[in-house]
Image: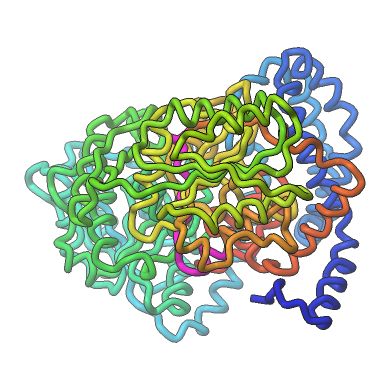
């Protein structure tokens, strides 16, 4: 990593050059400034009058929309579709945006984390890699794979619609990668058409398809084990009897196997397919995410396992029907650990959505939810983790980890200057509504002159838990925190803005319980605007140019992108408006950069450095606090602050250029302009 702290003249020249380079990115920087202004005016935007006039404002942005379409998509669309088709696509998109605008009032309350189906279908035609030219190119490249293992596709079967079963079988037959085996176990289906289809498939397969017919119905775990017994391949791929594989699914798996010979478990992105064959609802997943996999099973479609590993853990367990694949994954993960798991950031699996399928709704199989909780409890017990688990409103898992018998000391660090009303509310709610028993507070006074604020600070002079540190001078958020940390005694540091308002007496209990889990360096919280809409539920690197909050503006109970605003998950960064950090790790990485990142991005920079040490950053949305953002430091739109912000943008891009384009908690198919929208074109889709 280039050392920004090096004061040599050579490094100063590098910084100046970086600033010159990024001066050409004025639009990115302007976007960041506008984003700050947007956040400060969010409460106004949430009023009914603002929403009601949205259609009128949208009509004024069509020219901007056209400019965006041209700048973002011209090269890829022209190279594939030609000028006439490009123009038609553009007109269609503008028409859709106009229509959405005039329907804006009716749709104002509708929260969505994914793009409209029509947008996804358009995107898929460009980047889904299932066109004839894509398949031909892949076929021509097969010779480059030094290792071409046999892949066994395992399908448990019971009374599917024959048409859908045929589609599943055909999707295997259509694989560009040729070295595969299809293993089907029928669980005593009563539909004669299914039996006939399986018999004819087996007789015509020339040995590539093996089918076993069970005499009694024993449900999916036992049936899957029967199919596993047929498998001869080095790798196992799981396929439901009504789902469909992408024609390059096995090709990309074998590509990864050649590039990552250490991989033991592999998964891909997925979408859903309806009864008419239309694709929708893509799930573009993160790289392996320990906290998220405990919150939801994002692995299984497409889920790939080394056969030797599956045999080692004993295959599928009966009694976990509906979540038998989740149970299998957790047991395999316990054996191989995080580093043996790889992600292919491409949609390689189309999950059939119908009334009996959990693709349509998790509630369609309530027994599956109970089985998943049982599998998760078993996993936590094997890992020696004390916790209780239960289901959330959308079928995800909520884990309440236990607090240590001897709770570690937490040093709460609160920089402040004036703002008596904010300071009073912050300190009162922290002191009076914090159930956690072992804390101290260091208030860093950055030159308060307001009489009421001074009275508030003096009122705590007799409280042995609270220490006021006087640090007058310019506002340097990084330096204020660093000086307080130098005096902190705690094992954990809770960095807290003076405009935070506590809502739940268990807030610090929940953060500490997450923090003390193995490998965790920091824990972030979900922050809300005063109107209870979401301000922050994690930071995405690269969003808006450097880094940005995700799910901003969603309602409190909105799930966001596949429930990410409601479930605990690992992130690359989280805001330090409320951030619990391991004190030793904070000091090991040098704390906040108080020379080059005095105000903006210091928390992002800190989190990246913690990640470089191998630590996890956990976002725990079960902790919700109100954040009156920037109210205490004022607007960031003055000329001096704009210049400071631009310098900080340049430093971040110079220091972390590659990391900002590769957030492992995000997906390269998702946009860095608008969170969880489609990226056109995708970024680097190398397996990770």
In x, y percent, where is residue 574?
56, 49
Residue lying furthest left: 216
Residue 117 or 162: which is nearer the viewer? 117
Residue lying furthest front: 462
Residue 356 or 625: which is nearer the viewer? 625
- The reply to whether residue 676 is visible in this rendering is no
Left or right: 558 with respect to 656?
A: left
Residue 458 or 25: which is nearer the viewer? 458
The answer to whether residue 348 is magenta is no
Left or right: 136 with respect to 220?
A: right
Quadrant position of residue 90:
top right
How was this image coloured? rainbow
Residue 608 or 5: which is nearer the viewer? 5
- The reply to whether residue 290 is visible in this rendering is yes
Position of residue 196 relative to residue 22, above or below, is above
In x, y percent, where is residue 396?
37, 37
Residue lying furthest bottom: 146
Residue that appears at 82% across and 72% down:
15
The answer to whether residue 614 is magenta is yes
Residue that appears at 79% across and 53% down:
73
In x, y percent, where is residue 448?
72, 37
| Magenta stretch bounds | 609-623
Query: How many numbered dots are placed on residues in this image?
Result: 0
Quarter in which the N terminus is drawn: bottom right
Residue that appears at 13% across and 43% down:
319
Residue that appears at 67% across and 56% down:
479
In x, y percent, where is residue 147?
40, 83
Left or right: 94 with respect to 112?
A: right
């Amino acid at each position: 990593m280039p050392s920004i702290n090096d004061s040599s003249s050579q490094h100063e020249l590098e910084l100046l050059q970086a600033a010159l380079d990024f001066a050409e990115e004025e639009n990115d920087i302007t976007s960041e400034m506008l984003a700050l202004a947007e956040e400060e005016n969010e409460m106004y935007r949430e009023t009914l009058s603002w929403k009601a006039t949205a259609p009128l404002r949208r009509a004024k942005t069509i020219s901007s929309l056209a400019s965006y379409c041209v700048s973002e998509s011209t090269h890829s669309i022209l190279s594939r579709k030609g000028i006439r088709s490009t123009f038609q696509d553009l007109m269609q998109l503008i028409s859709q945006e106009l229509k959405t605008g005039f329907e804006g009032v009716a749709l104002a309350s509708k929260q969505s984390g994914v793009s409209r189906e029509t947008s996804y279908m358009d995107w898929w035609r460009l980047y889904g890699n299932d066109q004839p030219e894509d398949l031909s190119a892949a076929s021509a490249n097969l010779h480059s794979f030094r290792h071409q293992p046999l892949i066994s596709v395992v399908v448990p079967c019971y009374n599917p619609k024959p048409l859908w079963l045929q589609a599943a079988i055909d999707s295997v037959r259509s694989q560009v990668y040729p070295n595969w085996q299809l293993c089907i176990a029928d669980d005593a289906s009563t539909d004669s058409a299914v039996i006939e289809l399986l018999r004819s498939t087996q007789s015509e397969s020339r040995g590539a398809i093996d089918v076993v017919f069970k005499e009694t119905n024993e449900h999916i775990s036992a049936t899957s084990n029967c199919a596993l017994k047929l498998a001869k391949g080095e790798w196992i791929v799981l396929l439901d009897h009504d789902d469909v594989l992408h024609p390059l699914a096995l090709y990309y798996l074998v590509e990864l196997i050649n590039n990552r010979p250490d991989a033991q478990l592999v998964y891909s992105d997925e979408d859903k397919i309806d009864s008419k064959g239309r694709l929708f609802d893509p799930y573009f997943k993160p790289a392996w995410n320990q906290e998220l996999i405990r919150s939801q099973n994002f692995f299984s479609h497409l889920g790939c396992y080394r056969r030797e590993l599956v045999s080692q853990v004993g295959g599928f367990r009966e009694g976990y029907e509906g979540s038998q694949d989740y149970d299998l994954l957790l047991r395999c993960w316990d054996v191989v650990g995080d580093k043996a798991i790889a992600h292919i950031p491409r949609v390689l699996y189309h999950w059939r959505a119908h009334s009996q399928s959990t693709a349509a709704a998790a509630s369609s199989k309530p027994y599956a939810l109970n089985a998943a909780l049982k599998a998760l409890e078993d996993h936590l017990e094997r890992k020696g983790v004390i916790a209780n688990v239960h289901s959330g409103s959308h079928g995800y898992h909520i884990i309440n980890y236990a607090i240590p018998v001897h709770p570690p000391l937490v040093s709460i660090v609160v920089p402040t200057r004036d703002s008596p009303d904010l300071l009073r509310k912050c300190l009162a709610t922290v002191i009076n509504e914090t159930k956690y028993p072992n804390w101290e507070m260091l208030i860093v006074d950055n030159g308060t002159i307001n009489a009421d604020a001074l009275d508030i600070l003096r009122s705590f002079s007799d409280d042995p838990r609270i220490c006021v540190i006087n640090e007058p001078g310019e506002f340097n958020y990084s330096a204020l925190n660093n000086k307080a940390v130098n005096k902190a005694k705690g094992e954990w540091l809770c960095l807290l803005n003076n405009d935070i308002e506590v809502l739940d007496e268990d807030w610090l209990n929940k953060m500490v319980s997450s923090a003390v889990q193995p490998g965790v360096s920091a824990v972030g919280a979900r922050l809300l605007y005063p109107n209870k809409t979401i301000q922050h539920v994690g930071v995405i690197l690269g969003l808006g140019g450097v880094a940005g909050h995700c799910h901003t503006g969603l309602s409190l109970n909105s799930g966001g992108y596949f429930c990410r605003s409601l479930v605990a998950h690992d992130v690359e960064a989280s805001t330090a408006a409320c951030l619990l950090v391991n004190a030793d790790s904070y000091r090991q990485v040098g704390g906040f950069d108080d020379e080059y990142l005095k105000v903006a991005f210091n928390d992002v920079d800190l989190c990246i450095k913690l990640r470089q040490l191998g630590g996890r950053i956990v976002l725990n949305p079960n902790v919700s606090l109100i954040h009156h953002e920037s109210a205490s430091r004022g607007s960031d739109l003055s000329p001096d602050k704009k210049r400071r912000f631009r310098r900080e943008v340049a430093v971040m891009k110079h220091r972390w250029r590659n990391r900002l384009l590769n957030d492992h908690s995000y997906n390269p198919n998702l946009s860095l302009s608008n969170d969880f929208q489609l990226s056109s074109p995708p970024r680097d889709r190398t397996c990770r």
